[in-house]
Amino acid sequence: MSDSQVPDHTVRIEPQGWVFDAPANSTVFMAARQAGIRLPTSCRNGTCRACMSQMLAGEVRYVDRPGLTREERDEGWILPCVARPMSSLTLHVPEATPWDAPR
């Protein structure tokens, strides 16, 4: 499947109510960045857990095993810096800001 054929999934960031499209072949973090939304992050490889966010709805996959325990995954926690959407998502990320906002 070429990049033009990769389906987009809708991602909703709560409590802000921001919505953007994320291709299945992109991480949630990179799709948010392209949409002008800054999600918390540090390492961008799933080890530091700075981006750890609660997934309220949806399904993600990981290329590499993320730094989450089974219990955290069962509770809906994800690492957006390495998570790729498999469906539309709703995430609780109160720390998210517009990309151009001061840190």
Image (tube, rainbow, N blue to C red):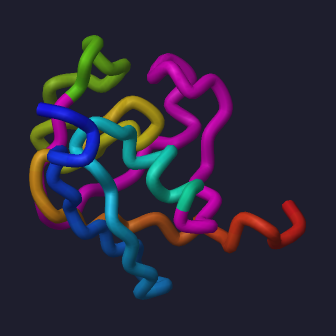
In the image, residue 101 sits, relative to residue 81, either above or below, namely below
Residues 10 and 43: in front is 10
Q: Quadrant of residue 39?
A: bottom right
Which span of residues is magenta-colored? 35-61
Number of residue marks: 0
Q: Name the residue located 25 percent from the left edge and 47 percent from the top edge.
A: 4
The answer to whether residue 45 is magenta is: yes
- Check the image and report above or below for 58 versus 70: below
**Dominant secondary structure of the residues highlighted in magenta in the image:** loop
Percent of width and height locating residue 8: 22, 58
In which quarter of the view is residue 102 placed?
Answer: bottom right
Q: Tell me where residue 14 appears, x and y as whole percent.
A: 40, 78
Q: Quadrant of the C terminus?
A: bottom right
Kindly identify the residue that appears in the image at 32 percent across and 56 percent down.
22
**Residue located at (50% from left, 31% from top):** 49
Q: Which of 47 and 44 is in front in this view?
A: 44
Q: In this view, does 79 lie above or below 54?
A: above
Horizontal arrangement in the rendering, residue 67 relative to residue 16 (left or right): left
Q: In which quarter of the image is the N terminus?
A: top left
Q: Which residue lies furthest to the top in this view?
A: 64
The percent position of residue 19, horizontal first and vertical second, equals 38, 78
Farthest residue in the bottom direction? 17
* 11 within the magenta span: no
- Residue 89, position in %: x, y? 21, 63
* 68 with respect to 60 (left or right): right
